[in-house]
Image: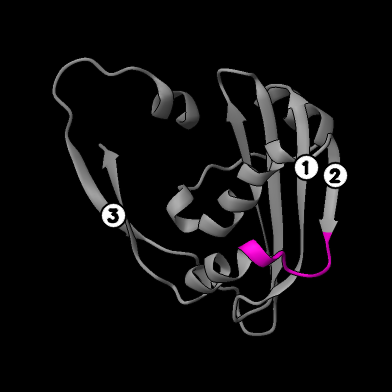
Amino acid sequence: MRWYNACKTIIGTLDHTVFQLQWKAPRPDACKVNTYGSKINATGLSGAGGLLQDAIGAWIQGFIVNLGASTILEIHEHWCCAIKHIYCEQNVAIDALAARSYNLGPGLHVYDEMPDFFEDILATDAKGILRPRAVIL
């Protein structure tokens, strides 16, 4: 329901506030898995990216998957996953991986080593850089 409310067209005045968002590290003895899905509405193509990071935000392993033409509900059913929305400003690194999925062949692509294009993006997220996000209340 929150996703529907976030996407629906709003008519009239909008009250909004700006939040400062950032990637949040896991506790020191843990690692963190973040994933992000993406869809190009004009083509119907869907993709996703995922990243396993240590407590300081360093790369452990990542993936990109080109899902072809599919909907979020089809992905949810096929991959047996829960969907929880967070703003891309909290997940810039994963957003970058998901965006690359359209340039790859269909299926899953696993990366044991961090891709060259990704180093600066990951470092920015790991530093906890605050990013503004205007949110409609």
Callout 2–callout 1 Cβ contact below 8 Å? yes
User: Foreground: 122 or 50?
Assistant: 122
For the residues carrying marks 3 and 2, which lies nearer the camera in this image?
A: 2
Q: Which residue is mark 1?
A: 65
- The residue at 73%/31% (across/down) is 76
Amino acid type shown at disc 3: Phe
Residue at disc 3, secondary structure: strand
Amino acid type shown at disc 1: Val
Amino acid type shown at disc 2: Leu
78 on left or right of 22: right
- The residue at 60%/79% (across/down) is 27
x, y (%) of residue 30? 70, 77
x, y (%) of residue 41? 56, 21
**Distance between the alpha carbons at the discs numbered 3 and 2:** 34 Å
- The residue at 53%/65% (across/down) is 121
Q: How packed is label 1: few (under 14 Cα within 10 Å), some, or many (20 or more)?
A: many
Q: How packed is label 2: few (under 14 Cα within 10 Å), some, or many (20 or more)?
A: some
Q: Which residue is mark 3?
A: 19
Q: How packed is label 3: few (under 14 Cα within 10 Å), some, or many (20 or more)?
A: few
> Where is residue 136, by image quadrant?
top left
x, y (%) of residue 22? 42, 64
Residue at disc 1, secondary structure: strand
- On the question of residue 71 being in view, the answer is yes
Q: Is residue 59 magenta?
A: no
Residue at disc 2, secondary structure: strand
105 on left or right of 130: right
Q: Which residue is mark 2?
A: 108
Rendered position, 17 above or below 8:
below
Q: How many marks?
A: 3
Q: Which residues are magenta?
A: 111-117
